[in-house]
Amino acid sequence: MRTGILIDELGVGFEAMTTQARDAAKLGYGTLWVAQRGGWDALTALPALAAAAPGLELGTCVVPTYTRHPITMAAQALTVQAAAGVPVHLGLGLSHRFVVEGEYGYSYDRPIRHLREYLQALHPLLRGEKADVHGESLTAAGAVNAPGAQRPAVLIGSVSPQSTRLAGELADGVITTWAGPRAIGEFVVPALGGPSRVVSGQLVCVTSEVDERRAALEERYGGAATIPAYRAILDRGGYERVSDSALIGDEETVRRQVKSLEDAGATELLVMPFGSAAEQARTRELLAT
């Protein structure tokens, strides 16, 4: 199973992000991932990380579709791929109603219809072809002229049955959040309906203080369990709380947990370290191998 790592962009300066990229390269990670969480722009950051850590692949996890028209998204993704000179994995997602309507003021009506039309427009654009989509949620009639740019892979941040099935039909795979082995094996992989990439995003802490770390994680992220899409994936995994889904324990325990994800059908691990600075360093070192 391939292993990539999340670059922590929340509340840190850009120099700190490039330092993380260099450290990940030294440890041997294969992919650097950047989230879109209200701070630095994930796609724009990728070429700078490529310069700091040459040769590593790059990905976003994930950029909301509603904030960028497919033609704009394709132009930016192709530009980033050409500038970085390495494979780019374009992680896209629907976000949530309270974000799309509450922060951006857009309609979140029938989001799966929107995602289908978005992907139908995006794919020809990434291949250098003209999009000709006149849908109910968007119109995209144009092309992106980016000579020599390679098509980025498209992954859907997915936790619902509809978006997962759509990813199997119109994308290269999914990026999961809060999904454990049971959810991946019994829900995600069957819903994809065929060979697809399953990037398993996991909060990980190598530590001897398991209860303390779960409590801290619950304090920080526990509210996610009240978001319907996340509640559903937690239930499918047999988890009551968000912190139940995290990989926490000593080295051998975390190795076993990672192996269970691979056995369930995850093709790639997206490591999101947490804990003290020492515990995060211990986590990064273990999972780089």
Image (cartoon, grey):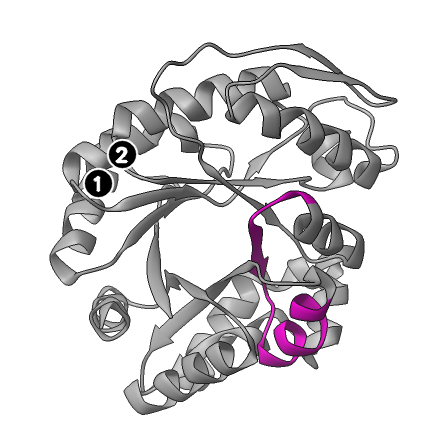
Q: Residue at x 31, y 24 (%)?
A: 82
Characterize the local packing of mark 1: few (<14), some (14-19) or many (20 or more) Cα atoms within 10 angstroms: few
Where residue 133 sits, quadrant-wise, is: top right
Residue 119 in picture, x, y percent from top left: 67, 33
Q: What amino acid type is highlighted by mark number 1?
A: Ala
Q: Does the magenta stretch include residue 174?
A: yes
**Which image quarter holds the C terminus?**
bottom left
Q: Can residue 85 be seen in this view?
A: yes
Image quarter where the N terminus lies is bottom left
Range of residues picked out in magenta: 170-190
Front residue (pair 164, 43): 164
- Please give the label number shown on residue 1: none
Q: Is residue 208 left or right of residue 200?
A: left
The answer to whether 67 appears left or right of 216 in the picture is: right
Residue 13 numbered mark, or none = 2
Asked if one can make out residue 227 in the rendered structure from this viewpoint, the answer is: no
Secondary structure under the numbered disc 2 in the rendered image: loop
Left or right, residue 233 beside residue 32: right
Pointer 1: what residue? 16
Q: Please determine whether, in this image, residue 265 is positioned above or below residue 146.
A: below
